Image: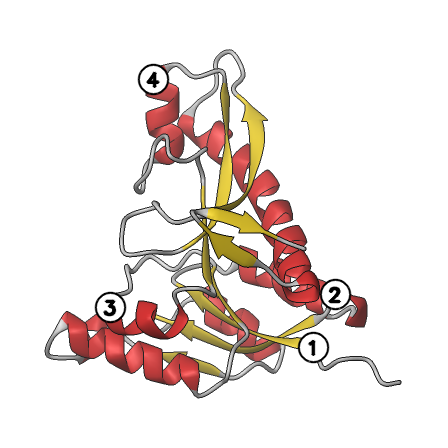
């Protein structure tokens, strides 16, 4: 009996690609059960694309500015991702909100990670907002993307204690370490074991 083919991952990036690198390293082990088949970006000249090229992974770039409307960009992004027939699409620091066309195609298999414990502190300043509020526990959330901002069904969460004297930079860096490990662990579990989403509850058999 042959092993099943590895699940196909398309990873979307906007910057350095540190989460992408963690996934590339994880997928090098056949037991992980997945391979990165393409990396997409919203701009040229970023380290994430360099990481993909170094690993021999195909890349594509869809800049919002290259299209007349945001909907045109969204449809083009969805089309380019679909060309690679992904089982799971991973936002790894992708800083653009996708729209209806993309969500119609991939809404039940597009995941994102956020550097706060949702539903608290959504948006782009999670650690800063958590510090300002005075929480004792921060963390990261992995979730399926929906039409809202950081509002989709939660897959997993990891807690990161807030230390006395923490700065936004220090807390953010500690969250990144936990966030990256969580992303790698749960992407692997999703592709190996499958998942269902019902009433906002994500279940892995």
Instruction: Decide which of 54, 66 is in the foreground and name it.
Output: 66
Tell me how far mark 3 sits from mark 1, CA to CA: 28 Å
Q: Which residue is mark 3?
A: 100
Point out residue 99 in the picture as x, y percentages from the top left corner.
Answer: 24, 66
Of mark 4 and mark 2, the one earlier in the sequence is 2
Circle 1 sits in a helix, a strand or a loop, which is it?
loop
Of mark 4 and mark 1, the one earlier in the sequence is 1
Q: Which residue is mark 4?
A: 133
Tell me how far mark 4 sits from mark 1, CA to CA: 43 Å
Position of the N terminus by quadrant: bottom right
**29 w.r.t. 97: above or below:** below
**95 w.r.t. 130: above or below:** below
Nearer to us of marks 4 and 1 is 1
Q: Which residue is mark 2?
A: 32
Q: Is residue 60 visible?
A: yes
Of mark 2 and mark 1, the one earlier in the sequence is 1
Q: Are marks 3 and 1 in contact (CB under 8 Å)?
A: no
Instruction: Decide which of 154, 80 is in the foreground and name it.
Output: 154
Of mark 3 and mark 2, the one earlier in the sequence is 2
């Amino acid at each position: 009996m042959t092993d099943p083919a590895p699940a196909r991952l398309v990873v979307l990036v906007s910057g350095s690609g540190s989460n992408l690198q963690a996934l590339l390293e994880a997928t090098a082990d056949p037991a992980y059960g997945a391979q990165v088949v393409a990396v997409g970006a919203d701009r040229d000249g970023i380290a994430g694309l360099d990481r993909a090229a170094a690993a021999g992974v195909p890349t594509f770039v869809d800049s919002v500015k290259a299209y007349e409307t945001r909907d045109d960009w969204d449809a083009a992004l969805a089309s380019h991702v679909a060309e690679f027939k992904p089982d799971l699409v991973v936002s790894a620091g992708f800083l653009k909100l996708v729209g209806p066309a993309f969500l119609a195609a991939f809404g039940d298999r597009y995941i994102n990670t956020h550097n706060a414990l949702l539903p608290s502190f959504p948006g782009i300043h999670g650690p800063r907002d958590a510090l300002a509020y005075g929480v004792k526990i921060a963390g990261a959330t992995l979730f399926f993307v929906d039409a809202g901002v950081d509002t989709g069904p939660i897959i997993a969460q990891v807690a990161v204690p807030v230390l006395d004297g923490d700065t936004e930079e220090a807390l953010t860096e500690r969250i990144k370490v936990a966030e990256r490990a969580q992303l790698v662990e749960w992407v692997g579990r999703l592709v190996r074991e499958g998942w269902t989403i019902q009433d906002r509850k994500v279940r892995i058999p």
